[in-house]
Amino acid sequence: MPEKRDLIFVVDFGGQYTQLIARRIRELKVYCEIVPSTASWAELRKRSPRGLIFSGGPASVYAPGAPRCGSELLQGEIPVLGICYGMQLMAYLLGGKVSRGERREYGPARLTLLREDFLFRGLPREISVWMSHGDLVETPPPGFLIAATTDQTRVAAMFDPSRHLYGVQFHPEVHHTPQGREILAGFLYNVCGCRGDWTPASFITEQVEEIRRIVGKEKVIGALSGGVDSAVAATLAHKAVGDQLTCIFVDHGLLRKEERNEVEKTFRKELGIRTVVVDARKRFLEKLKGVGDPEEKRRVIGHEFIRVFEEEAARLGEAGFLLQGTLYPDVIESGSQTAAVIKTHHNVGGLPADLKLRLLEPLRWLFKDEVRQVGLELGLPEAIIWRQPFPGPGLAVRILGEVTGEKLEVVQEADLIVRDEIRRAGLEREIWQFFAVLLPVRSVGVMGDERTYAHPIVIRAVTSEDAMTADWARLPSGVLARISSRIVNEVPGVNRVLYDITSKPPATIEWE
Ligand code: XMP
């Protein structure tokens, strides 16, 4: 189906910055999707894209098995911008010459612009750009002009405006190329004629229509986790189909304090979404009895969650769709090989595999920051929009060893104090995650005149971009002091507070 809005395809040649290119284009208010390099022009053209961007990639165009695309993409029917490997491939497929550079060029370079044209319009004659390549284009293909050069790379940009083909050896998508945004904007607006009509509001209008069209008169069920993704997905679906949607929120007892009340208040009362809250606390605790191994805990919780969800879904009667808060990076990554399993990340609120429902995934084209923008536009409370990531198995992975009702209470109280003090210090947005962990060991302390023999609480606070790597947060000592003194005074059963000063790697963010 042709698109109503402008569409750009990012053709992926395996580059580490492919997702970043897509995000930059969206930031310039142009909708784009990433497609594999094997996609044929016959397929792509059905959706009437305005332009293609060829990503970078680690291969050499001459290497056996190097990713290629058909040369029919380069016939001038559609504008193409090739970045790094994308430019080398363009040169190779159109009869230019690509060669091995004498040495890898990595880092900043001074770029001298030789032509203004569409891409570089309005830029100074010299700009700073980021290079990361081994091969380079030695001779551009017939019809191309050299548009920019650096000391080490003669063909740092090449254009064939008559066929709307553009190549840059450097990376306009990374922030080390300060004018990269203007260069990408030049391609999108000047070359492809995009209007910049992609906004959260336009996304909402389109999705609401789309959900109505797909769902028709059928019923939809969804799981709420309290997190931003499931909340935005539910609010969108509710806007589209109203009471045809029922959300299920499973209180497995491993939640943070007040979490269940907040979900009930927001979804049921404020947003008017049909929400079934299942009190399964006893059931989960029962199942977790005697379970100390972290992976076993995850398995038990995941399994039980699905059973509870299925029972509730059956009680609600015939539904046609299961609503999921899947995001674009999950969609992209599910196509790639998974790395070694460090922890099985059971996504509570996730897939009951054999529910036989069709999936409704309205966020599957969005990046996380876009989900937040859509959520704000939909009027969701900031507390949900900016909620810190919370593991599906909840506090069970923050109570080392066996989980019991008493330990849950201890960790919930301590966690509340940590959250409260971080919020008071105004550090909520700076810190990626902050929480309390209860250790199964005991140590000696003294309280009043009494000897105590009780458990320690560990405070974990980390900064991170994406949870793949993380650093321990340099919390002000005053904040740490207040947290410590409040926990030992207010939480029975705790006589010592520790601060975890390990980064990830080698540690992980959670303790289990
Ligand atoms: P780690 O501990 O692996 O955590 O550094 C990285 C991020 O994932 C979250 N996490 C989980 N999320 N189910 C989830 O849905 C899980 O089993 C799980 N374990 C860890 C963790 O909070 C951090 O944001």
Image: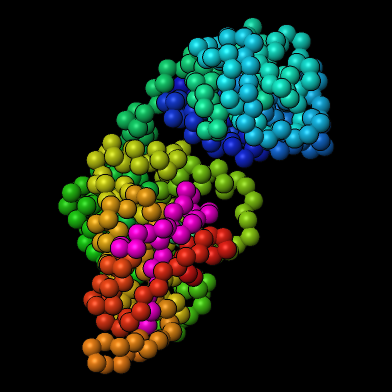
User: Can I make out residue 142 in this image?
Assistant: yes
Q: Which residues are magenta?
A: 455-479
Q: Position of residue 4 (x, y in %)?
A: 42, 21
Q: Is residue 284 above or below residue 165?
A: below
Q: Nearer the viewer, residue 489 or 248?
A: 489
In this view, the residue farthest toward the top is: 162
At 32% across and 81% down in the image, what residue appears? Answer: 494
Q: Is residue 169 above or below residue 402?
A: above
Q: Nearer the viewer, residue 41 or 322?
A: 41
Its colouring scheme is rainbow
Check residue 476 for magenta coloring. Answer: yes
Check residue 233 for magenta coloring. Answer: no
Residue 488 relative to residue 305: left or right: left
Q: Nearer the viewer, residue 411 or 234?
A: 411
Q: Position of residue 424 (x, y in %)?
A: 24, 57
Residue 73 relative to residue 296: left or right: right
Q: Position of residue 3 (x, y in %)?
A: 46, 23
User: Can I make out residue 311 in this image?
Assistant: no
Q: Quadrant of residue 117?
A: top right
At 53% across and 36% down in the image, what residue appears? Answer: 20
Q: Position of residue 448 (x, y in %)?
A: 23, 88
Q: Quadrant of residue 338?
A: bottom right
At 59% across and 17% down in the image, what residue appears? Answer: 126
At 54% across and 18% down in the image, what residue appears? Answer: 187
